[in-house]
């Protein structure tokens, strides 16, 4: 015997829609950098964050790029192994490492960032009239601790 469930509109449930939309957007760009450069989504997030922020700890990286610690650590380890990032001991606490782009990593990002900028331009053209409202809405959601 099943109990009747309350009405629920999954197609309008914002957490679900934002997740699906985010996954679709990530997948669109990920196909390109995976195919052309062999970079995973997690590795892209690490690289682009380091390109934007400079040297950061793995702990800061996990928090800022929304990756689980194990995924962030594996991505950073692979990128270091491939020579795209360097790991530098933190001068205040040598047990902690700071990650930064190597020269090879900067060269890779010089190729990847124009792809991302082109993807961004295509999205902005698609959403042109609603873009400012979308940014305002996302800023509000991201500022709240829901």
Image: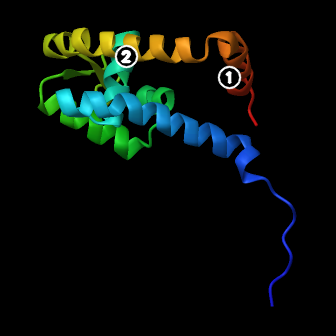
Disc number placed over residue 49 in the picture, else none = none
Q: What residue is disc 2 on?
A: 116
In the image, taking residue 17 as reference, residue 100 lies left or right, namely: left
From the viewer's perspective, is residue 51 above or below residue 69? above
- 56 and 11: which one is in front? 11
**In front: label 1 or label 2:** 2
Q: Secondary structure at mark 2?
A: helix
Taking the view exactly as shown, the residue that stands out farthest to the bottom is 1
Q: Is residue 54 visible?
A: no
In the image, taking residue 28 as reference, residue 100 lies left or right, namely: left
Marks 1/2: CA–CA distance: 19 Å
Q: How many numbered discs sit on the rendered protein?
A: 2
Q: What residue is disc 1 on?
A: 138
Quarter of the image with the N terminus in it = bottom right
Residue 50 screen position, x and y as percent:
34, 17
Callout 1: few (<14), some (14-19), or many (20+) C-alpha neighbours within 10 Å?
A: few
Residue at x 21%, y 33% (from the top left corner) = 35
Residue at x 72%, y 52% (from the top left corner) = 10
Callout 2: few (<14), some (14-19), or many (20+) C-alpha neighbours within 10 Å?
A: some
Residue 40 screen position, x and y as percent:
29, 36
Quarter of the image with the C terminus in it = top right
């Amino acid at each position: 015997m099943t109990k009747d469930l309350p009405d629920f509109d999954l197609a309008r449930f914002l957490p679900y829609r934002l997740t699906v939309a985010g996954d679709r957007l990530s997948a669109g760009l990920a196909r390109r950098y995976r195919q052309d450069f062999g970079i995973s989504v997690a590795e892209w997030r690490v690289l682009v964050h380091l390109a934007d922020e400079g040297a950061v700890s793995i702990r800061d990286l996990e928090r800022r790029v929304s990756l689980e610690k194990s995924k962030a650590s594996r991505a950073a380890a692979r990128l270091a192994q491939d020579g795209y990032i360097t790991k530098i001991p933190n001068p205040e606490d040598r047990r902690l490492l700071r990650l930064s782009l190597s020269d090879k990593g900067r060269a890779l990002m010089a190729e990847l960032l124009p792809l991302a900028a082109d993807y961004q331009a295509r999205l902005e053209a698609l959403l042109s009239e609603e873009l400012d409202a979308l940014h305002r809405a996302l800023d509000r959601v991201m500022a709240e601790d829901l």
